[in-house]
Amino acid sequence: MSANLLNTKLEFAKKVVRQAGGFIRQHLSDDLEISEKTHFDDLVTNLDREVQEQILTQILSTFPKDHVLAEENDVRHDIKDGNVWVLDPIDGTTNFIVQRDNFAVMLAYYESGIGKIGVILDVMNDNLYWGDGISAYKNEAQIHLTVKPLRQSLIGVNTYMYRTNAGGLLDLSHESLGVRAIGSAGIEYVNILEGKIWGYFSNLSPWDYAAGAVLIAPFGYITQQIDGRPLAFEGRQMMMSVPSNQLDKIKAYLK
């Protein structure tokens, strides 16, 4: 793909994600229609579905040959098959419902399985994080990140994995200054970009990590299964986003 077309897609992604954030903020005081998906704490709202439909429609009308992999309504496509947009309309839905805070809109673009664009909007702070896998920006300012050693840092975690020592996460946490859990993968990736956490460990679906993986790659981060295998971009998998140059130091703790 030409650089011009890729830049067009990047600007498109930034625009539609910002528009989605504005739409959500306009409807914060609305009475939500809340439904359970797989469990009482796996929730979806009418706004999740409306935002997804708005962005999906814009993608397919602007780039009709592209495909979409999205969280709601079983919108699925193989990440390795052509040009694929990966969408999470409201990441951190439970936070959105309960707190009206700590949630994000996330959109990524992949070509034959390779991440080319990542965009995350911290909706309530109205900060847009975006990048192309080579550099990353917060609004219009380029991000410069110095990654500290694990023993000088905090880790972002999935609480269940931490409590049960899944993948050896509890063991690893003893080598850090502690753990933090937010309930939104998008905000966890924002915290990596802000230098607030060293890495992120969770049990996620593709739309939870697709954008974040692209955004943190310029700083030497790798996103993979906790056992070291590549992510499959389908279903839930225990995964981690960590500095690649510190992988050898943490392997002894992970299972």
Image (spheres, rainbow, N blue to C red):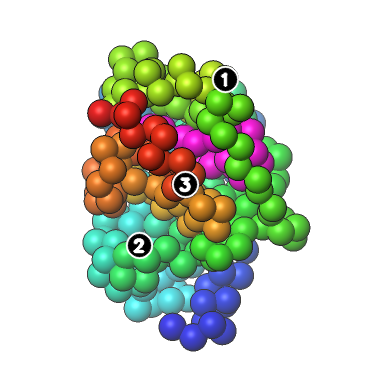
Pinpoint residue 222: horizontal percent, then vertical percent: 42, 49
Residue where numbered disc 2 is placed: 68
Q: Is residue 245 left or right of residue 170?
A: right
The amino acid type, in three-letter code, at marker 2 is Val
The amino acid type, in three-letter code, at marker 3 is Asn
> Within the magenta stretch, is there residue 196?
yes
Residue where numbered disc 3 is placed: 245
Quadrant of the image occupied by residue 167: top left
From the viewer's side, name the closer residue of 63 and 231: 231
Q: Quadrant of the N terminus?
A: bottom left
Question: Judging from the image, what secondary structure is the residue with disc 1 in?
Answer: loop
Q: Residue at x 59, y 28 (%)?
A: 153
The amino acid type, in three-letter code, at marker 1 is Leu
Quadrant of the image occupied by residue 85: bottom left
Q: Which residues are magenta?
A: 186-204
Question: Judging from the image, what secondary structure is the residue with disc 2 in?
Answer: strand
Contact? badges 3 and 1 (CB < 8 Å):
no
Residue where numbered disc 1 is placed: 177
Q: Is residue 199 left or right of residue 18?
A: left
Say which label, 2 or 1, has the lower sequence index: 2
Most extreme residue toward the top is 163
From the viewer's side, name the closer residue of 170 and 44: 170
